[in-house]
Amino acid sequence: MAPTSLKQQIKDRLCLTSGLPSANPTSSAWQEPPASIATTQSKTLPLETDIAIIGSGITGTSVAHSLLNHPRGSQLRVTILEARNACSGATGRNGGHLVSDTCGHFEHLVAALGVEEAVKMLKFSEANLEELKAVIAQLSEPEKDAVEFRQVIASSTLGDKATVDSLGRSMKLLQETGEKTKLGYTIVEDDNILHNKYKYRDGLAVCEQEGAGALWPYRLVTILQTHLLDDNAKTKKVWSGIMGFTADGFPMIGKLSRATTGRTGTEEWIAAAMTINPPQVQHASWEVRAAEKRARCADAIPKPWRLPSHILDSLKTPLETNKNDLVSLDIPRRSGILSDIELDITESYNVSSVLAKLADGTFTAVQVVTAFSKRAAIAQQLTNCLTETFFDQAELRARQLDELREGGKLAGPLHGLPISLKDTFHVPGTQATIGLVAFLDEFSKTTSPLVEILLSLGAVPYVKTNVPQTMMTADSQNNVFGRTLNPRNTALGAGGSSGGEGALVAFRGSPIGVGTDIGGSIRIPALCCGTYGFKPTAGRIPYGGQRGCSNPGLKFILACAGPLANDMKSLEIFTKSVIDARPADLDSTAIDVPWRNISTVSGKKLRLGVLPEDPSYPLQPPIRHAISQAVAKLRAEGHILVELDPKECLVSGINGVAWGLFSLDKTASRIVTDAGEPCIPSRQRITDELERLKWDFLPDLTALGDLDKLSTLNIKRAEVIESWRKVWQSHRLDAVIGPAAQNTAVQHDLYGVPPYTCFLNVLNYPACVIPFGSAKPIPGEEFTLNPDQAGPPYDAELTEGAPCSIQVFTSSMRDEECIAISSIVDNALKG
């Protein structure tokens, strides 16, 4: 076949009109006489609806009937979309038998799903028949006569011995479960009965099912549809042509992501819509809606992955007020949920080594994804770190990646790697509520650019993680999902706002996670939970296309996205892979600067500045000790350490600029207030600290309007950026090391403002947090705050054993150097 001929055939096939639905369809005797509801038409579709149901047959109508007769469904707007007239498909064009064939397949259901789930399927099928009978019983006598319902014994032909034997085994297996069925099943094999009763030839059998029924489906469905409309005084019914089609081929109807598809511009497609109930919807209280969301999250954990009671009973409860080191307790191993190989995958491999094993076929993507999915499920039950789980979709993608590898190809440099995502990222079919009641009704319809890139690189997203209310505190608690706990010590906070990521990665429920950072939101969870975290220069990793709760027109300090992991190499692999993918092609907020391979840093004796303790934010003893030890180790390696002056570093003053700019945007607070939900305690603590601090660096802003405040603050920001340029040049620094916080992880709700991370967001510098040591009580060392100082209280006993850390940062756009130098520092601290 000539290539041009093949192309023409493909083009003809793509442009072929399906012919469905037919412009002049035949009429079935079952649809005579036609119901009046089936032919009513108008010109418009509803622009908004709460529930959209595709198809007006028995299934669609049953769903609408169930929703609207539910105690919580009285205010729902339900729209049924149909390609032609109501009930014009298979339901309306055929006679109806109320039968259940689940018993006949029981053997296969047990093999595929297990006895417990197979029994549920059987009971569901039987309950469906009973519910239909109950609905019919509520009809008026004339309606019952029209429906022509009657009880019958249904018979099914069994055409061969294998089918007969399979049904016999199914019936025996069902009997052995002890479950009672509402339908009676009998296999008739007697030749005389078959011949006399059924007129069958020898060698056939029949299954008789007692308790079955027969009816006129078209009449039942259209009667129910009429009731659904007539029972609501303010309803309207609409039968309309589709207004148009979106670019992806789906109809234009408000708040609907999927519906009957058709060819753009084709007038022969007709959409039937029943809009039921008035447009004003009265939602349940925020407490009820939040509780329902939490219940759905809990139900999403597969039963085989749920922790046994003896594990939970062994913990000191309540978890958030008692010290439990969930990492040391080795719960994944003790629970028996993970196999030995799954434990090995999640505990013995980092991103680099697991990618190597995926590439050479030692591990399959399904193995790796399942291992981390199981461990994430355990982490969720202990730390409450997850908001969304899509384990089934992840497994399906992993299988597709395995098939690709079997064909000799890899999807990309992250082929088969599970990656967890902060709840801000959009993944279609999931929610991105960011813990706010206001977003509980919304589902993601788009894919965030960074997620698109990760998918193109071969990664496998599988969970999303928890955040604080408004994402402007360091305590990951909100009124929807509750509080995320620190797996190192459940009585301490996990940090925020990427606190779910910090907890999950520390528990090794994720090999690498993606957070965001506008004041320390990657680095704070890393330092609290003892992981590594990298905040890049804003724009190097794509940040666009996420859920936020700020005014997009008030972005004066740029947020960024970045990774959290359990080693420096993992951070480098992630960052390089994403930047190499040219993110600016997908995200207009990304900077199109390729990754630079840094060779001049390796083996070099570094000149490192040491960030001093700011007088307004004194360091707690464990952090002061960790910085001192780190400086000593680096000097011992031959690196040059330069002690910087607090007056040139301006940590306090830069924080004044930051919080002055943040305060101009009231959007998040307004979202919380409008939804009627209360403010979480950690947000109030930040407010109290900011009111107590004196910003001597700034002029008095109280008498200024917002525009003048903005102008003044931007001038100050430019001044501190220039001041730090002089610091780099005058001291000839390669990087700066210092504290990431005044403290380790602290008691819940007490973290307060994050001065040592936030000032770097104002400067837009890349920064790494590196775990180093743990908190130990230092005899004779006291810690108190003066009235003009801020910080969380120091509890030596409670924080004993909490991870300590240091922070390494470079000047803007030197992300490659920051990661390379951080790796050198990390190796020195381990020596």
Image (cartoon, helix red, strand yellow):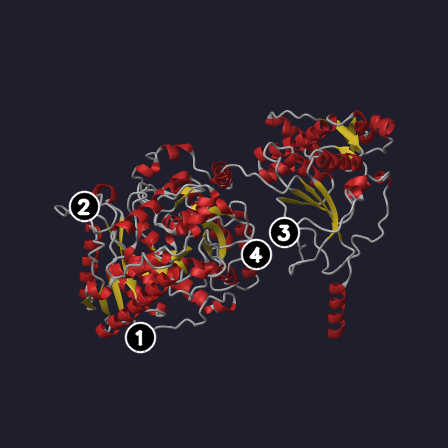
Q: Amino acid at mark 4?
A: Gln
Of the 4 image quadrants, the one containing the N terminus is bottom right
Of the 4 image quadrants, the one containing the C terminus is bottom left
Q: Secondary structure at mark 2?
A: loop
Label 1 close to label 2 by CB (< 8 Å): no
- Residue nearest the viewer, comparing 423 with 597: 423
| Residue 187 in view of the camera | no
Q: Amino acid at mark 2?
A: Pro
Q: Nearer the viewer, mark 1 or mark 3?
A: 3
Quadrant of the image occupied by residue 748: top left
Please name the residue shown 23% across and 71% down the image.
605
Label 1, label 2: how far apart the Cα atoms are:
41 Å
Spot occupied by residue 795 in the image (x, y as percentages of width and height): 22, 43
Dot 3 corresponds to which residue?
A: 254
Q: Relative to 806, is 73 on the left or the right?
A: right
Please name the residue shown 40% across and 51% down the image.
471
Crowdedness near tag 2: few (<14), some (14–19) or many (≥20) residues, C-alpha within 10 Å? some
Label 2 close to label 4 by CB (< 8 Å): no
Q: Secondary structure at mark 1?
A: loop
Q: Nearer the viewer, mark 3 or mark 2?
A: 3
Dot 2 corresponds to which residue?
A: 777
Farthest-out residue, left: 780
Q: Amino acid at mark 1?
A: Thr
Q: Amino acid at mark 3?
A: Gly
Q: Nearer the viewer, mark 2 or mark 4?
A: 2
